[in-house]
Amino acid sequence: MEKRLLGRTGHSSTVVTFGAIVLGKSELPQKQLDGIVDLAINQYGINHIDIAPGYGNAMEALAPSIPKIRNKIFLGTKTAVKDQKGAWENIQSCLQRLKVSNVDLLQLHGISTMAQLDEVTMKNGALDAIVESRQKGITKWIGITGHGPEAPKVHLEALRRFDFDTIMFPMSPSIWRNEKYQMDSKKLLKHAKTNNVGIQCIKMLARGGWGDSTPDCTTWYDPHRTQDEIDASLWWLLSQPIHTAPSTGEITVLPKILNSAERFYPLTKQEEAQAINRQKTAIKEPRLGIIN
């Protein structure tokens, strides 16, 4: 699997990150969860893991595998708590649940509006707890993540306020059809490249929402499912100036994502356009900016 330098971190991340949320979405026994980690890390060679305390029991499910793979992986986690004291306690809880003393990347989680950004960057906000964590050797790098139609604009402002090492925000062909989102994302990507910021993109398979229909996946959005659709969506994303993309929380598509990542080749501009237009959104998902 191709690897790309994750900005200034110096780590060459596989183009697909193991999204450990998949472990927290499953009710499989621990032995089978261990097998999922083995598939991603040892069989496909993924060397970057994304996890968060809000992903159900994902931390407890991942913890047994960590001693065997820690020297192979770049480990990133997050805190969604907004104040300094609460975020510090949340970070300590993450370490305990993962059974580790440190991580490689610690991120502000779910910063998707300017109001949320103000809250975490103010004095005694969550960012202060993450900076303290770096000073104490708990993390090497500091990042910010977010969802929603304002995320690129918010993250650009975040990079102006603080020298974050990484960003994480949604990108998929369906999201890219939103012209404002596309414009904001291009500004963010340009700024990130200029400042050597690591670029992680989530929601690679997002094609729309559920509306009033009954979800048949564990994701809160409607994802692509067939191998052809996954190839088109993932290859489009990896043809953009990004570094890595966390896999989705739907366990049934994980093997297809891994298979697709191994076969990736950069798309031509014509192929990119085809990927964007190949499947119009059936049900809009405004929470991701999927509006047409």
Image: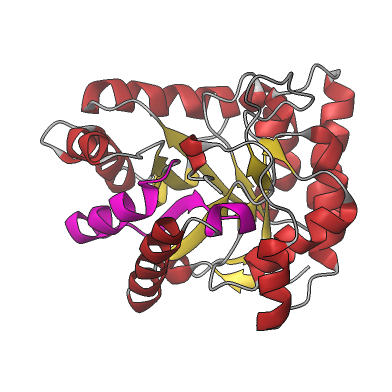
Q: Quadrant of residue 138?
A: top left
- Residue 41: give x, y in percent of width and height: 78, 50
Q: Position of residue 247 (x, y in %)?
A: 69, 46
Q: Quadrant of residue 5?
A: bottom right
Q: Quadrant of the N terminus?
A: bottom right
Q: Is residue 138 visible?
A: no
Residue lying at the far left in this picture: please name it: 123
Residues shaded magenta: 148-176
> How many discs mark residues in the rendered view?
0
Q: Where residue 92 sits in the image (x, y, percent)?
A: 41, 25
Q: Residue at x 32, y 27 (%)?
A: 87
Task: Residue 283: give x, y in percent of width and height.
Answer: 64, 36
Using residue 203 as the reference point, say whether residue 33 is left or right of it. right
Nearer the observer, 233 or 107: 233
Would you say 100 lies left or right of 217 here?
left
In depth, the one of 230 and 70 nearer the eye is 230
In the image, taking residue 203 as reference, residue 134 lies left or right, namely: left
Image point (52%, 45%), residue name = 291
Q: Residue at x 45, y 21 (%)?
A: 93
- Does residue 11 appear anywhere in the picture? yes
